[in-house]
Image (cartoon, helix red, strand yellow):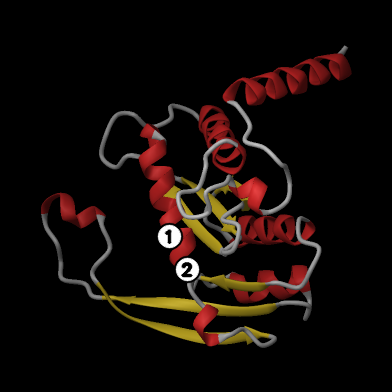
Amino acid sequence: MQGVFGIGDVWTWTAIDADSKLIVSYTLGDRTDVTARQFIQDLCKRLANRVHLTSDGYRPYPTAVPEAFGKEIDYGMLKKIYSNPGKEGAGRYSPGECCGAQRRKVIGKPAPAGISTSYVERQNLTMRMSMRRFTRLTNAFSKNVENLGYAVALHFMHYNFCRIHQTLRVTPAMEAGLTDRVWTPEEIAALADSVDKSQLALAA
């Protein structure tokens, strides 16, 4: 239920629930051990039950996951193997063709068939298609990290609470039992206004 999506020097780390398609946690940051630990620790705090977790083959995960979850998790890792054909032109910005994958158990008893990153990879595509600033090789990128953070927060709020999933026929938040209705963009805007006002009150 985990994935990392990069734009420039800032990466969007995401965790998605395979059943409800809910984005459970996300983090913006660099691609380092420190950010990996912060992301996994935040994910752990948002989960009440033992879960089946899959990550890609990024090196810090086998350390970060047990630090946060201990042994109370079924964790498997999927490491994709890419060819390196030496692409020229625009193709040089894309990875080589995937020619295989290695699945391995890290903690607990993850089901081999469940060791997959397909859902989060599809979510990465949804991010790219939904936010212009994530389009490759354009001048639509965020000019500062703060604006990127606002855009990503709005995207995930809309995705979880407003956007009806094509397969589920409800929003991810409804499928996860977090709400019983489809939220409107106006409700999200009102929620953002209330947060800003509370922050101003605390500052005063």
Query: Taking the image as drawn, is residue 177 in sight?
Result: yes
Circles 2 and 1, Cβ within 8 Å, touching? The answer is yes
Q: Where is residue 191 in the image (x, y as percent from the top left)?
A: 71, 24
- Residue lying at 68% horizontally and 61% vertically, measured from the top left: 40
Residue for badge 2: 117
Disc 2 marks a residue whose amino acid type is Thr
| Residue nearest the observer in this picture, 53 or 203 | 53
The numbered mark at residue 176 is none
Instruction: Tell me how far mark 2 sits from mark 1, CA to CA.
Output: 6 Å
Crowd rating for badge 1 (residues with CA inside 10 Å; few <14, some 14–19, many 20+): some
Q: Is mark 1 on a helix, strand or loop?
A: helix
Q: Position of residue 119 (x, y in %)?
A: 47, 62
Disc 1 marks a residue whose amino acid type is Glu
| Residue nearest the observer in this picture, 9 or 22 | 22
- Residue lying at 41% horizontally and 47% vertically, measured from the top left: 126
Residue for badge 1: 121
Q: Where is residue 124 in the image (x, y as percent from the top left)?
A: 43, 52
In the image, taking residue 24 as reference, residue 143 lies left or right, namely: left
* Relative height, residue 199 to residue 2 (above, below): above
* Relative height, residue 69 to residue 11 (above, below): below
- Residue lying at 41% horizontally and 37% vertically, measured from the top left: 130
* Relative height, residue 182 to residue 71 (above, below): above
Residue that sits furthest to the left in the current view: 88
Quadrant of the image for the C terminus?
top right
Q: How many marks?
A: 2
- Residue lying at 76% horizontally and 55% vertically, measured from the top left: 46
Q: Where is residue 80 in the image (x, y as percent from the top left)?
A: 38, 76
Quarter holding residue 110: bottom right
| Residue nearest the observer in this picture, 61 or 45 | 45
Query: Taking the image as drawn, is residue 8 in sight?
Result: no
* Relative height, residue 89 to residue 96 (above, below): above
